[in-house]
Image (tube, grey):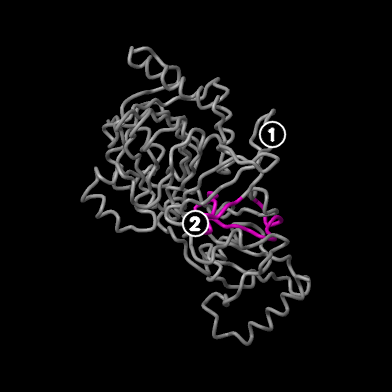
Amino acid sequence: MWCSQLLLLLLASITAESAITGGGAVKADMPAECDGVSTALWASQTHLVRGYHVLCVPDVCSETGKTNITICWNGRSTSCQSFEMDAMEKLVNVEEKLMGLRKPTNPARYAMLKKAKLITQEKGLYGFYKVSSSSEAPKAISSVKEFSGLILVFEGGNFLWPGIENGFKRTITMKPDGPKSKAITVQLQTLNAVRPAVFEVSLLTDKGQKFHLSTAKDCKGLVKKTNSSLKKVAMKQRVPGGVAGTDAGRGGVSTTIFVANNDDKLLKRMDRYIQALTLTTAAQLEITKLSRYRHDETFVPHLDAYEPQTIKGMNVWAREQFQGGMNNRFATVLLYLSSVTGGSTNFPLAGDPTNTDKLSQNMEQHQKNCDLGVASVVETGKHLLFYNTDAGSAVDESARHMGCNVLEGEKFLFNKWIWHRPLTRNFVKDESEED
């Protein structure tokens, strides 16, 4: 079947030479299904994601020894082409073929990694993920033997959930690591589809009922841990694996404690869940940040990812991990541990970059009203996942976010940052400190 389709496509390409754009690629339509999987769940008609590409890869045709691949550049179903590819020995060869068709969206980082010999003839940078089922998370592939069917490509190497469109809901079953862990079904609802991609995450029961991922008991336990840790710090007592301080120096007035999971079963379970949700490893996760916001406390718009121009203000640990721009916080997971009035997490630039001017003119009003861009309402147990970089690992300026004023109650927040590459060591001192 695949071979017949290939011959038809080759004949069609002869009459469509005017559509050839270079490298032998011709304009094409992505099929509605690829190896039995709906492509509409992975390629958007309206939104693009820089550095993310969707491929439909049939088996190699025995008659020609070639494969005719359809690719939707930047994850957009209206920007698709087909091209012919010889049999490849390694995935890095596929990467080189794609780069021959279209240059990487973040050439500076690619050049840095290549200079550092982290990109070689044996191992490239691009991440390849195979979608075998619409109801399961894609799986990373490491061999051309697995390079068939619906393949997602991420130029920066890390997986990012595509938003598709605002309000889009994706249901996925995944199994966190751990001897006693059980498969769980989650729903990702797109709060903002592009720049930045923001998702609210919920757990689904066998009966289809939706509830937040962490139970009230879990949240109460984390609130208790936050308060007890901050109390110890106030009394100048040591918190095992923890560093506390105020975020006032970074534009906030909350109180914060950084805590390593050590032997804490709840924190370890949360880490395993976050690894499954973001398709990352334990070595890419920072230690947990727990925060408390009281009445009228807030946090001004900021980026979780580090920017090259701010490197002089980084502490030793951050500069060590940043590696001149080769590594960064590409994703953030937030968990609300309490319900309050106000205190929403707000992305003021989502959908309208010109909101920067409005913010600068009346920051205090917009922090209180939370009326620009998109915002996630604070509810006990709600998870928020958002990306601080695009799929090419370039910092996304529109990912600036703020904590709006808490109007009533105490807001407690669990925060986890995920990096592109494994950390050389984990956080050991307050980030507000500089050398």
Q: Secondary structure at mark 1?
A: loop
Quadrant in the rendering for residue 310: top left
Q: Please tell me which residue lies in front, 115 or 11.
A: 11
Q: Is residue 392 above or below residue 369?
A: below
Residue type, numbered disc 1: Lys
Residue lying furthest bottom in this view? 15
Identify which residue, 144 or 347, lies in the foreground.
Answer: 347
Placement of the N terminus among the 4 image quadrants: bottom right
In this picture, which residue range is highlighted in magenta? 141-170
Q: Residue 348: x percent and y percent?
A: 34, 50
Question: Within 10 angstroms of label 1, few (less than 14), some, or many (20 or more) residues?
Answer: few
Query: Can residue 154 be found in the magenta stretch?
Result: yes
The secondary structure type at the circle numbered 2 is loop
- Give the residue pinned by disc 1: 182
- Residue 8 falls within the magenta-colored stretch: no
> Residue at left 38%, top 48%?
347
Residue 17 x %, y %: 58, 85
Name the residue tied to disc 2.
Answer: 166
Q: In the image, 293: left or right of 330?
A: left
For marks 1 and 2, the one nearer the N-term is 2
The kind of residue tagged 2 is: Asn
Q: Is residue 371 left or right of residue 100?
A: left
